[in-house]
Image: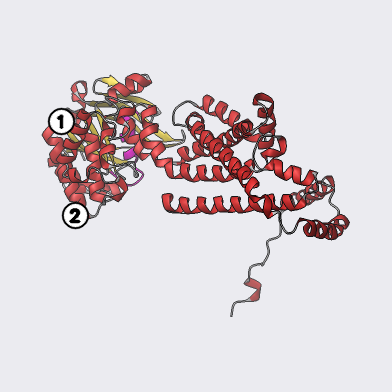
Amino acid sequence: MTDAALSPARLARPSALSFLGYAAGAMILVWALEGAGFSLDKALASGPRLADFLSRAWPPATERLPSLSWKMVETLQIAVAGAALGVVLSVPFALLAARGVLVGPAVNAAVRAVLGFIRAVPDLAWALVFVVAVGLGPFAGMLAIMMDTLGFCARFFADDMENVDKGPAEALEATGAKKLDIAATAIIPAAMPAFVSTSLFGLEKAVRSSTILGLVGAGGIGIELKVGFDLFDYQTAMTVILMIAVVVIAVEQVGAVVRRRIIGVEQ
Amino acid sequence: MALDAGTRGEAASADLAVTGLAMSFGGARPVFSGLDFAVARGEALALVGANGAGKSTLLRCCLGLVAPDAGAVRLLGEDILALGAARRRALRRHTGLVAQRHNLVPRLSVLSNVIHGLLGQAGGPRFWSHAAAPEEARTRAMAALDRVGIADLALRRADRLSGGQSQRAAIARALVSEPRLLIADEPCASLDPAAGEEIMALFFRLVRETGVTVIFTSHQIDHALTYGDRVLGLKAGGFAIDARAEALAPADFRMLYD
């Protein structure tokens, strides 16, 4: 039998610094909840209103499915076109952003800063910008998705390239190959599975984003959602919400299957 | 062990001449210092030493892939460390590297991997894949694969080769550009003993046929004695052995690993 006195303490006593960290974290959470107008009363009182909404939204307006389906097709077209262009544009940006691949650290940092800015601007803000630039409609939405995908994919492509095994690149460097040739033949092929995985996540993200771009006039099914709520046509709004859920889940499932088949692992 | 002082006098006509080479990790812990050696044209130099002795770092310094803290490296008559990027690349058209882990690009065909060995001589998109490569490049690559005995595997993906086949493909990639100097960093370390022997025999038969200068590392003393013309033993940051292979016996190496 082990002497109880020798048994280690079950919980480590936090240091003064750790205690201050926990206290600061708790204060920030309280501050954020207050700023967000958190109210338990309102949350509890929302039950009957939510039930009222659901009773008026159910059953969904199935007779509107044909016209809404065309809007959903347009939504998918915006997502696929925007994501594809964003992925293609991401490759040169990523080559310039990846450390030790093509250019020096100053250019890497500058390109990463640009990508950080592109990523920091929300997709709806990009959509508003492009509505101003090219007018209302799906083209503005496609450009917004393209920018969103570029900010997302280029950063991860760059990280993927930095993380590949450097051995093949070194073997080619030892034969006098140029950096661009090395990137094209040793680094990008090695990073390709990660590129495919990231691109599929980019497409899933694009499909989710494209469903709400219509809220700001950038095409797609989002406009139907807005009109449904504006006109208190909750059955149509519910139909749109369910269609979005089905399409987004389907795209995610297809993405997972493709990732498994192409890469061999689900990430 | 007496140092072979005669080899140092050959530096002027050597394919590789290293003087006063020093390297440390992060400028603090020295890996080696004050290394002087030369490798004559067509010579096979074996570099031995315990793990962490700095063999791989030294090899990379010789090709200018790693910058040393001090010293000079004259590779094929030029001070590689003093050259700009373009001149350094031009010089490396005459060198090659065979590594322990073979370093093929896994998802590409064996033929594409070997054609990539020509990128130093003629780069550009046509050399990125065997499908687009000029006929001459394909012919040279197939000839190199034939010499290492795996021409029939040209279109197989590199990650579907056995260890021995993979190292044969790496040797073909290193030889396809007909280099003057090859660095081989533990070329058979990742192979089973039988495959390792086969690869070493093949590699040295090919380099002897073509008169390529070779610097190789190995943990197997018999490889150093069999395939090396001269042996350098790294210990505690300096050369504890510098002698012709025929003047050495396996027992001479024990002190490197003590």
- Residue A166 image offset from top left, x and y in percent: 39, 39
Residue at the spot of label 1: B42
Write down the region rendered in magenta. Answer: B49-64
- Whether the magenta-drawn stretch holds residue A104 is answered as no
Q: Quadrant of residue A9?
A: bottom right
Q: Nearer the viewer, mark 1 or mark 2?
A: 2
- Residue B19 image offset from top left, x and y in percent: 30, 26
Q: Pointer 1 indicates a residue of which chain?
A: B
- Residue A7 image offset from top left, x and y in percent: 63, 71
Check the image and report above or below for B119 versus B166.
above
Callout 1 and callout 2 share a chain: yes
Placement of the N terminus of chain A among the 4 image quadrants: bottom right
Judging depth in this view, the residue of A114 and A1 nearest the camera is A114
For the question of whether residue B180 can be seen, the reply is no
Q: Marks 1/2: CA distance?
A: 27 Å
Residue found 29% across the figure and 21% down from its top? B90
Residue at the spot of label 2: B194
Q: Are marks 1 and 2 in contact (CB under 8 Å)?
A: no
Q: Quadrant of residue B167?
A: top left
Judge the density around disc 1: few (<14), some (14-19), many (≥20) Cα neighbours within 10 Å: some
Given the image, on which type of amino acid does mark 2 rest? Answer: Ala
